[in-house]
Amino acid sequence: MVLRVDGLEVRYGKLHALRGASLSVAPGETVGVIGETGSGKSTLARAVLGLVPASAGQIVVDGTDVTGLNTRQWRAFRRRGVVQYVFQDPLRSLDPDLTIASSLTEPLRIQGVSFAEAASRARELLKRVSLGPELLDRLPGELSGGQRQRVAVARALIVEPRLVLLDEPVSALDSSNRVRVLELLKQLRDAGTSLLFISHDLGSVAGVADRVAVLYRGEIVEQGPVRDVISRPTHPYTKLLVGSAPTLRSAAADRAARASLRALLTSEGAVS
């Protein structure tokens, strides 16, 4: 497995952000993690990256148990480029003062790759994400949102990582750029890149992921192959997500799913 998470718990003070979360990503597999804001999706990604400590459980990335790594060990592990992260807003991951060429080649230069080889790989990666070499001399602010996000994906791929984490990679984009980035993710999946695709939108994930895990209030309440989860959802929250995606279910199913979720929340005392 490229990623294995077993019984992961994360606490922020008294807040239990994740409770016993377990999932895995195999080589060449795309796994979607779906849930609303506050469900624990980004906490899961940050734990895998070592940005928040695990309160319990285990995280293994490409055969390395990273759960208890200290700051120095994490720094060394990240420099290997095993796992890369794509933010929701590419301006957070691209230095606004660096050209696209500098942003793309920086990870390779840190690894000791020559300038000529790094520049060649930067041009190749831009082509792979359907962008032209004329963008290399531009700053991030001179690109469209969709172009910046594709550059961010290229930057993540340039070190040939074993796993790429994508945290809401299309939610900040307009519809046309969303389609372009989703198509790119499909191409990466088909080329054998391992992806952990985090989103609140089941419709976006359904066309890209092989399997999906549903997070609800810090717990993974359902997971399995995308087709099975969509066609036979078992948890009321999953039924809501499926029913809320018009391309996945009918209006009648949507109403039934919402009724099921309201009944669940009422029974838990979440709504009056």
Image (tube, rainbow, N blue to C red):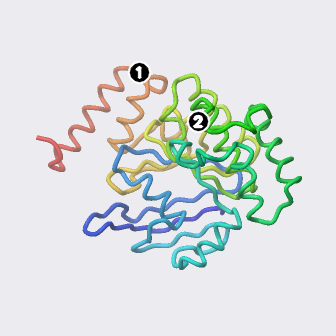
Side of 103 where 67 appears, left or right: left
Q: Which mark is residue 117?
A: none
The amino acid beneath tag 1 is Ser
Q: Could you say which is closer to the camera, residue 189 or residue 144?
A: 144
Q: Is residue 100 above or below residue 6?
A: above
Secondary structure at numbered mark 1: loop
Task: Locate residue 271 relative to residue 55 in the image: left or right.
Answer: left
- Decide: is 247 above or below 81: above
Instruction: Pick whichever, 234 or 221, lies toward us.
Output: 221
Residue in the image at 61% along x and 62% along y: 3
Query: Quick check: marks 1 and 2 in contact, CB under 8 Å?
Result: no
- Residue sitting at 60 percent across and 31 percent down? 146
Identity of the residue drawn at 64% across and 67% down? 78
* SS category of the residue bearing label 2: helix
Which amino acid does the dot numbered 2 rest on? Gly
Question: Which of the image's four quarters has the N terminus?
Answer: bottom right
Query: What residue would you read off at disc 2?
Result: 141
Q: Position of residue 200 (x, y in %)?
A: 43, 40
Crowding at mark 2 (Cα within 10 Å: few <14, some 14-19, many 20+): some
Q: Nearer the viewer, residue 165 or 23?
A: 165
Outermost residue, top side: 251
Quadrant of residue 185 within the rendered picture = top right
Residue to which mark 1 is pinned: 250
Q: CA distance from mark 1 to mark 2?
A: 41 Å
Count the numbered circles shown. Answer: 2
Q: Position of residue 101 (x, y in %)?
A: 74, 45
Q: Is residue 142 left or right of residue 131?
A: left
Residue 100 x, y percent position in the rendering: 70, 42
